Amino acid sequence: MDPVHNPFAPGAGSQPPQLAGRQAIIDEAGVAIQRALLYKSTRPQLFLGLRGVGKTVLLNKIQEMAEQAGHLVSFVEAPENRSLGELLMPKIDQLLHKLSVTASAKAKVYSALRALRSFGSAFKLTYGDVSLSVEAEPGVADSGNLENDLSELFVQVGEAAKAAGRGWTLLIDEVQYLKPVDLAALIVALHKINQKRLPVLFFGAGLPQVAALSGDAKSYAERLFLYPVVGPLEVADAKMAIRHPVNEEGATISEQALDEIIDKTHCYPYFLQEWGHQCWNIAQAGKIDLADAKNAALRATKRLDEGFFKVRFERLTPKEREYVIAMAKLGAGPYRSSDIADALGETSQSLGPRRAQIINKGMIYSPSHGDIAFTVAMFDEYLMRNFVKKDDGSSSA
Ligand SMILES: Nc1ncnc2c1ncn2[C@@H]1O[C@H](COP(=O)(O)OP(=O)(O)OP(=O)(O)O)[C@@H](O)[C@H]1O
Ligand SMILES: [Mg+2]
């Protein structure tokens, strides 16, 4: 069918035509947004899930909802090699300038800007495009202890937002890449805000290991955060994610075609978009049938192998690749670390650093002690398809 009208949206953070199966999470976020504006306590939330399940899309949706409700929103993606402070400085600066237009907030905004300047000086943060034209406020957010100083800064920002009658929603994506000191400081600051009933709301998203990372950073994190699990969709929702956009464009899809898509994608959102996209382009005359869905599998798999899977695999060193291929050869995960060590003829201890590096790169995680799993669904199948010789000698990179 006409690719110009293809409704599907495979891609990182791309808004899907139908945000299926996430209503409970969205409703709960909606309640938190409203509660924050009434200065009622709200728990910060961390969305946890594998690659491509729709975490970023949820943060985008929450941004839209929060803005509509009167919050100002700062959205940052944790980088692998910059500090949280560096990342937040320009965002908080922008936020405070937006708040400063409200007369009732001027004094609080001014204090918060001075605290921001102190914070920047204390941590020698380069201001970049920050336009700080105020003096630092000695004694505020400048002790050099990140946990204290970030908390003081957040409180000042929260008070400025309150004085302006607005909320502040902070969204942080890829939380697993925050350095442990930054994560600890973030948790302490959110805890502080929570106690003070300031109109500040936090939603983060990251890979499943974020639960353990936040617990390691601060033991009370487990009680502070809500951890909604963002997983594959329920079958009915996955079907809806495909059928609804097709129908909206005036086309139809057969039940057998839908079953085939469910079978191949295991209801993972990214894969559903990829399959939907290919089915649409292959089908003729307004109807997607089983044959189209089967053909789509070939194209979708090829696209994933050349994009989604490949970009992740290429971030690994040759030794790290050897490790993940050994995992894949053991079948579908999770895997015992000791089994991988056996397969490689090494000990778990000697492989520890390699394993830790692959975890840091966000490729694998430990679902429970001694176990390891891929953060990308069906990655084992990708590796087997592309890097492991079959008995007949085919299919090896
Ligand atoms: N609820 C949903 N229904 C249908 N499609 C969805 C849904 N959520 C996400 N998608 C689609 O899945 C793909 C991946 O979404 P997104 O980038 O938000 O995932 P992610 O969890 O942030 O992945 P990563 O960990 O790689 O950043 C996008 O193409 C998006 O359109
Ligand atoms: Mg994402």
Image: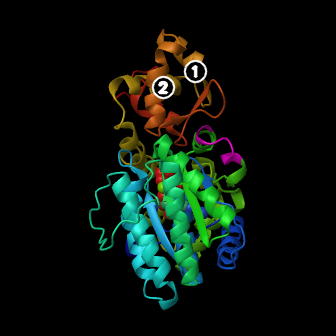
Give the residue at x 39% y 79%.
97
Q: Nearer the viewer, residue 183 or 133?
A: 133
Above or below, comparing residue 381 to residue 173 in the picture? above
Relative image position of residue 78 (x, y in whole percent): 43, 52
Circle 1: residue type = Ser
Q: Earlier in the sequence, mark 2 or mark 1?
A: 1
How far is mark 2 from mark 1, CA to CA?
9 Å
Above or below, comparing residue 62 to residue 357 in the picture? below
Which secondary structure lies at badge 1?
helix
Are discs 2 and 1 less than 8 Å apart at CB?
yes
Q: What stretch of residues is rendered in magenta?
A: 216-222
Q: Which residue is mark 1?
A: 337
Circle 2: residue type = Arg
Name the image quarter holding the C terminus: top left
Above or below, comparing residue 46 to residue 95 in the picture? above
* Count of numbered badges drawn on the protein: 2
Q: Nearer the viewer, residue 366 or 383?
A: 366
Above or below, comparing residue 29 to residue 220 in the picture? below
Relative image position of residue 20 (x, y in whole percent): 63, 66
Quadrant for residue 118, please give it: bottom left
In magenta segment, residue 221:
yes
Q: Which residue is mark 2?
A: 355
